[in-house]
Every structure is written in C-alpha cells, then in structure tokens.
C-alpha cells in the first residue's frame, strides 16, 4: 500500500497542468459603414463601369482577386458583363411589399382629415418607395420632420439615406440623430450637421472637421435652433435588419457574403458570353481568296468581334486545291448552365424566390408547389412588413407632434394602423375549390367562406350583401327566435316567480293564489 501511495504522489507531482496562453487575433476592418454603403449603392445601380472603377480602388485582401478587380492580359481581353441582379432584387421586393399597402387606418376622423391635408400631394408614399429601397441595400436611414412656414403651413418630412445619417445612443436607445449635408462655396467644402434630439434641433457647420459659424456660407446663415417639449424627437430612424458588423446600424440584404456571390455570378455569365463569342464559326480562306476592298484593293481584315475568316498559305503548285474550310467550335452549354444556376441559387438564398423574379429554374405544375417555392420571398416580405408597421406610425406621430408644436396646441397620441394585404395566395380557382370543400363538409359558414375567398379585395358592406344574396339563392331564411307571449299575464313578484296558467278557471286560479289545492 505504501508503494501505491508513493506512486500516486509522484504522478501528481509530475502531472502539472498549466493553462494555455491566450492568443491575440487582430482583424483590421478594410472599410467602414460609409464605404460599405457606397459599395452597396454601386452594386444596386448596376453600372459595369462603376463596378470596375470601384474594385480597382478596393485592392485590399480578398478584393484584389475578385472578378471585377481582375485585369485581362493585353490582347486577351474578356468582356465583363453585369447581370443587374442586385438592383432587380431590391426593386421587386419593394414592389411586392408596397403594392399590398392599404390606406392608413386612423381611429379618429379628425386625424385622418388632418393627415390628408398634410400629405395632399401624396409625397409620403413616393418617399416611402425610396426609403424602403435604401433600407434594403444600404441598411438604414431616417426621416426628419422639417418646419418651414415659408414653404408650407404644415410640417414636411424628408427621407435621408443612412449614407448621410449618424446616430448617438444612450442606454441602448437613440439619443440624437445627426443629418449630414455638404455645401460647396468659394471652392471650399462645408459639412452641415443637423442634430435632432429630444426637445431640440440644433445646427453645426464644419470646414475640414473644424466648426465654423453658420453665417459662413449663404445656405446656412438663416438657420436657427429650435427647442420644444423634451419628450418629442422629430426624427425617426428606420431599418429592416440589424448589421452584424457595425453596431447600432442597419443591415443590408447584400451582407452575409452576397456581394461575393454577385461577383461570382457575373463571372459565370461573362465567361459564358465570352465562350459564345469565341465559339463563332471560323472560316479558313487561302490568301489568294481573301476578300478585298473594291475601291482600294486592300485586304479586309476581320476584327475581334466578327472574326469570321482566317488566312492560310496559298498552294501555288500545279495540282493545288485552294479550298475554303469552316470549323464550328463546340461550346459546353450544359457546364455553363450548371455554373450559372448554382451561382444564381447562392445569390437568391434567404432573400427572394426565383419565381418572384420571373426566373423559371425548375418547372412546377401545381399551385401548392408554387407556394412552397415562394416561401423565401414570403419570409423576407414578412420581415419588411413587420418593420414598416412599427416605424410608419412613429413617422405619422412625428408629423402630428410637429403640427401641434407649430400651432402651440396640446400634444396628443395619434392611433393609426398600417395594414398590408395578403401575399402569395393560391389561384382563385384553387381557393374556390378549397372553400367549397370546407363549406360542403360543414366546417365553414357562408360568412366565413365569402371572407376567405375575397379577403381584402372587397369591403365589409359588399361581403354582407353577397352573403345575403347567397342565402336567398340557396333558400336559407333567417328567422328570429320565438318570444314568449306574456300579454294579459299578471306576475306578482311578492308571491312567487312562476306565471299563472292562463287557461285555468278563475276558481282554480283563486284557490292557487290562496294556497289551497283543487280537488278532482
């Protein structure tokens, strides 16, 4: 036993475990939020010249090896083609959401009429279209409420892209919203900061990061600071997603590596198109048979685009046979198509369904399968709708707050609902079939079937008339419940609660009231 204890002690003393030294991993951000927003904007615009210029300047780390940053060998240039897919995704998602936007549902008619006056020109919906697009590809932005009685007696709103907005947070909540705008005067670039906080709007003018008086330039000399109720913020930040990289900023749908996928997609398409051009039929013509300019007699040389013929050495022997031969290179269309579809799938994953963009990647022959295919779009649309239903009432409330401040009225809460119609419903024929089966099976009433079939496309009054018409055609008569005829019956609550029997003789009734029974 002593030997075993000795061995154990020696093992304990020998097995000395020390914690590992922590490693320090240093990662340097190549671009900030503003530069990232500019990059996303260029991808959205979809100009191939701008893309090539962009990546010629972003030559850091992996960007230098991307398709749009690559340079062709002189004499072997490849045509770079942009598909326009990022801009198309943003446009279609915006249309999918806003086309189903119903009118704002105000609880008060007074508020409804006032909003109609403030938005008489319906500029807010136009701004909303721009705002939603920029929220999708830039990440965020903000509405600012502007009060300018020289321009309008009502408050106005202006959407500002996240590219020109900064936020200051405290305890996880927005404390200030800073709107940036640039002015050029006397060959100098000035930057104006409009600071919207709780209870105030202030202005600061900067020249080369140094604050200067507002009267330094003509555009800002008449600007004045405002103070009002400290519970009111006349700026409303808006975003759909939160950025994983930049704290307190919105996330773009181009994040999560989508720009790399767009770059690869453009490369797959460009190579395919380059192969088609290179795969033109080539005609080999002896030099003696080459086409010549009829006016000068000079040889007509083909260019890189219409490279239709190639000169060969003429055979001048007695039995020469100068023939023109044509070769048609084979193009592996299936391989290019597979690469194209794979790259396209990576671009659309988690954002939008191919069928929403009108892309027929795989034939689907029934409505149910089509609805399954639309789920990616449905989920993205749901996130957008949820965000808009949260932020739009706040924007409307800010309008009313500014109006009450301008007119020195009491601040009141405005109750308004932002409703959107349904999306990705099956065809009308499929709905009729489903509703008919449910009604025949006795699990759906006429009222429920009409509401399910027409949804938001018809108002409540029309649905009510339709239900009445269907019941009339089907011979369904609504009857009121029969009521007990109590006419001529006297009830004495002091005696008992049971009414007397009206067909009894007066004697029997009197005996009953006196508490005696009747004999038979």
Image: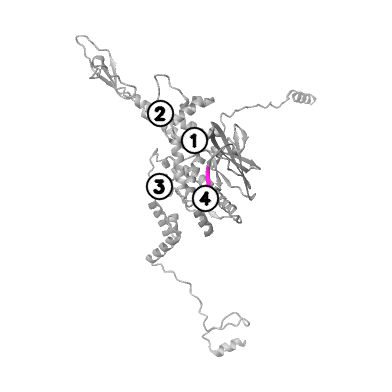
Mark closer to the chain start, 3 or 1: 1
112 relative position to 366: left or right: right
Mark closer to the chain start, 4 or 1: 1
The boundaries of the magenta stretch are 149-159
> Which residue bears the numbered disc 4?
152
Query: Residue 520: which quarter of the image?
Result: bottom right
Pick the front one: 117 or 506? 117
Residue at x 62%, y 83% (from the top left corner) = 495
Q: Is disc 2 in contact with disc 3, using a CB cutoff of under 8 Å?
A: no
Residue 507 position, x and y percent, is: 56, 90
Which numbered marker is on residue 270?
A: 2
Which numbered marker is on residue 41?
A: 1
Mark closer to the chain start, 2 or 3: 2
- The secondary structure type at the circle numbered 4 is loop
Mark closer to the chain start, 4 or 2: 4
Mark closer to the chain start, 3 or 4: 4
User: What is the chief secondary structure element of the magenta stretch?
Assistant: loop
Residue at x 53%, y 31% (from the top left corner) = 187
């Amino acid at each position: 036993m002593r030997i075993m204890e000795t061995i154990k002690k020696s093992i304990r003393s020998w097995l000395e475990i020390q914690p590992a030294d922590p490693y320090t991993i240093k990662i340097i951000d190549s671009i900030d939020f503003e530069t990232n927003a500019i990059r996303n904007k260029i991808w959205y615009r979809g100009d191939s010249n701008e893309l090539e210029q962009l990546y010629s300047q972003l030559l850091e780390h992996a960007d230098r090896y991307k398709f749009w940053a690559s340079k062709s060998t002189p004499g072997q240039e490849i045509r770079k083609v942009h598909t326009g897919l990022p801009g198309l995704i943003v446009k279609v998602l915006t249309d999918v959401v806003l086309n189903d936007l119903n009118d704002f549902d105000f609880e008060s008619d007074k508020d409804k009429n006032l909003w109609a006056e403030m938005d008489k020109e319906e500029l807010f919906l136009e701004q909303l279209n721009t705002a939603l697009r920029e929220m999708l590809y830039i990440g965020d932005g903000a509405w600012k409420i502007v009060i300018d009685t020289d321009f309008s007696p009502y408050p106005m709103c202006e959407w500002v892209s996240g590219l020109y907005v900064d936020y200051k947070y405290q305890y996880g909540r927005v404390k200030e919203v800073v709107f940036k705008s640039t002015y050029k005067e006397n060959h100098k670039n000035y930057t104006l900061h409009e600071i919207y906080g709780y209870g105030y709007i202030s202005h600061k003018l900067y020249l080369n990061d140094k604050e200067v008086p507002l009267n330094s330039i003509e555009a800002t000399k008449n600007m004045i600071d405002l103070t009002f109720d400290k519970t009111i913020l006349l700026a409303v930040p808006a975003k759909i997603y939160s950025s994983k990289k930049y704290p307190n900023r919105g996330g773009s749908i181009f994040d999560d590596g989508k720009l790399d996928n767009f770059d690869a997609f453009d490369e797959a398409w460009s190579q395919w198109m380059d192969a088609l051009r290179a795969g033109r039929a080539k005609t080999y013509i002896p030099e003696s048979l080459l086409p010549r300019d009829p006016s000068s007699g000079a040889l007509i040389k083909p260019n890189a685009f219409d490279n239709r013929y190639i000169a060969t050495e003429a055979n001048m022997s007695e039995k020469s046979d100068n023939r023109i031969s044509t070769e048609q290179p084979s193009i592996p269309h299936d391989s290019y198509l597979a690469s194209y579809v794979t790259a396209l799938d990576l671009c659309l994953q988690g954002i939008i369904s191919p069928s929403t963009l009108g892309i027929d990647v795989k034939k689907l022959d029934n409505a149910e399968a089509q609805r399954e295919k639309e789920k990616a779009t449905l989920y993205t649309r749901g996130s957008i709708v949820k965000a808009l239903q949260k932020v739009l009432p706040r924007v409307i409330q800010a309008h009313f707050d500014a109006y009450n401040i301008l007119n020195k009225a009491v601040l009141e809460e405005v109750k308004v609902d932002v409703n959107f119609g349904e999306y990705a419903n099956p065809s009308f024929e499929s709905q009729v079939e489903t509703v008919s089966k449910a009604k025949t099976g006795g699990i759906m009433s006429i009222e429920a079937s009409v509401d399910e079939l027409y949804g938001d496309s018809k108002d409540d009054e029309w649905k009510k008339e339709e239900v009445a018409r269907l019941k009339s055609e089907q011979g369904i008569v609504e009857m009121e419940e029969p009521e007990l005829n109590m006419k001529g019956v006297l009830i004495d609550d002091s005696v008992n609660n049971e009414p007397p029997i009206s067909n009894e003789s007066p004697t029997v009734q009197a005996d009953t009231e006196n508490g005696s029974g009747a004999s038979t």
